[in-house]
Each structure stands twice: as C-alpha cells, then as structure tokens.
Image (tube, helix red, strand yellow):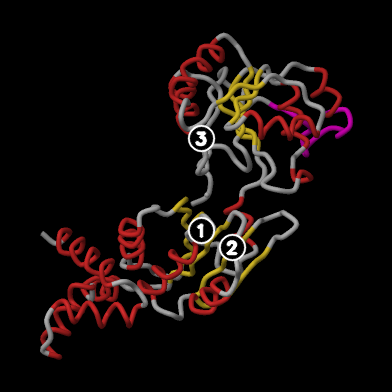
Amino acid sequence: MPSDTRNKNVGAPGAGPPQTGPRLWGGDLASETRESNDSPLAPGLYLVATPIGNLGDITLRALDVLRRADRIACEDTRQTQKLLNHFEIATPTISCHEHNERERAAELVVALQSGARIALVSDAGTPAISDPGGWLVRAAIDAGIPVIPIPGANAALNALIASGFAATEFHFLGFLPEKAGARRSLLEDLAHQPRAASATLIFYEAPHRILETLADLESVWGPNLRIVVARELTKIHEEFLRGTITELRATLASRDRIRGEIVLLVEAPAQSPASAETTANESLAMRVARMQSEENIDEKEALKRLAREMGQSKSELYRELQRQRARRR
C-alpha cells in the first residue's frame, strides 16, 4: 500500500525491539524456537500481517504471536476466526474496525498500559494499509506503548514485484475516490506532476469500478499508457494482465463479469517540469476554448465533440470543465 513506514519501538533504554519467534542470526534455530514458545510474549501492540488469499503465506512468527497474545483485535472477528480455527488458535478476539476504531482504541490502550499483549489484524494483508489500524497505532505510540510490526503478505508489494515495472520509485495511493469527478481530478493532478524518471503508481480498485477507472486513465494519459491489472493475488484464479490501457480496457470489457480484488499499477512516464506545466495547461478548458476559436463553434458543441472523441458523456465533461474553472479562480 509508497512502502510501509516503520516506527521505532518504545521500550526500556537499550532493550531494543522485543524478540518473538525464531531469529535467523546467531544460535541454533531449534533452540530459539523452544525458547520463544516457553518465554512470555513481551507486552505491546503487535501488527500482524495475515494471508491475502493463500493460507500457506502466514509466517511462523505471526502464528506464534497470535497464539500467545492476550487478545486479537480484528477488522472482522468472523473473518479472522476462520484463520484462527484453521491453525487451531484459541486466543480471544475483539472487533476493531473503521466504525468503532476510535472508541476501541481508548479501551485497548488502557489494557496495553497495564501490560497486555494485543495483536492487531485486518481481514487480509498488513493492518493499517488501506485497512483499519492507523488510529490505534497512533494512540499506542502517543501512550508510549511498544508497537511491533510482524511482516507478511501485502497485495500492493506482491503486485509490484511481479508487474515488470520499476520498483526503484513507486507510490501507493490506496483506493481511488468513488465519485467520478474526484477520481478524475486526482488522476489529472498525478499526470501533471514532474518526474525525473518513470514511476510506478499503485492503486486498489473494486471490480465494479475498474472499467470506469481505466476510462479515466486513458482520457488523462492517453491510449498508450502501460498498466498492469493484478487480480485475486495468491488465490486459485490469480491473474496478471499487462499491456496498454486500450488493450486492457478491451480485454476486461469483453468479460461477462469482473470479479475479485484488484491491484492497479500505472507506469507514469518521466516528465520535466516544463513538460508538466505544458500538460497541465492543456486542460479540458483550454481544449474547449481552442475548439471554439478554431472551429467557430459554441461551448456546447465543443463538449459534444470532445465527449465522442474521449468516449465520455457530455454531462461528465461539463462537470469536469466547471471543476477546472473553479480551481483556476
């Protein structure tokens, strides 16, 4: 979901981060495992990544923490219970989702201040990456409680490394806005940003909105924009579609139904500051004005022709024209 930001653990001076599970440096691995299982889990908030599809992707350390925690705070207790039942883990669970996180955080911080060991999980993947958890993490840090990340599955990073796009510079932007106008405005802002080299933009998108989003991408960046659609990662029907925006729009539009969770990757081309300014200036408003001048037509006719050219509705282009004019005031 850019790369994860890691915080430092707050603990006793010189103590370093709490150790859980077998370590890969120094000593015997088997004895490390035995010591881990025999010793109590250090107090603190554990951010535990869980599988995004394939249950085999759970880590040994994650299982160790989930078994030995006092409680597991879950985005959806029913979803997490399936995982716990599969691995025969009996740790009590408590809900912590987008609708109750602020209130629940206060309760959990009190328990953590008393020395509790609480694991935080989302339905799938890494907590707080386009999932609940960020509020609780900040509250724990503010209270001086150790926050310990337990690495694991993440859809954005898995899609990135298999995309074929450069991973030197990438930007994770989460879910795009649901409303068409806000989504289009965000994509235009991203297209106008100067870049010394091409960069990979990573989004999450719902299957029922993917075709609308691809249409917006094509209208903003043009038909030759290179993208990757990664669908149902680690699951039975995992799929990577790679190509130009035009090719992938046609591929997905030909399907009866688009299913599954989607990671959308965009190869944003390099753009000098001067080129970025020129691109930004060539807005919809500028195109409409130019057409009115060169072709001697009114605004309504210009929008009608642009709508046909761009494959969008005239009403949507009109709303976008109003947004652009409002931003320039």
Q: How many marks?
A: 3
Residue 192 part of the magenta-drawn span = no
Left-right relation of 31 to 181: right
Q: Using the image, determine if residue 105 lies above or below residue 230.
A: above
Q: Secondary structure at mark 2?
A: loop
Quadrant of res 198: bottom left
Report, in whole angstroms, how far the alpha carbon at label 2 lies from the one at label 3: 26 Å
- The magenta-colored residue range is 19-32
Judging by the rendered image, the residue that carries numbered circle 3 is 132
Tag 2: residue type?
Answer: Ile
Q: Using the image, determine if residue 250 lies above or below residue 116.
A: below
Q: Secondary structure at mark 1?
A: loop
Judging by the rendered image, the residue that carries numbered circle 2 is 258
Left-right relation of 262 to 85: left
In front: mark 2 or mark 3? Answer: 2
Residue 17, position as x, y percentages in the image: 62, 27
Residue drawn at 23 percent across, 63 percent down: 319
Report, in whole angstroms, how far the alpha carbon at label 1 lies from the one at label 2: 7 Å
Camera-side residue: 325 or 6? 325
Tag 3: residue type?
Answer: Pro
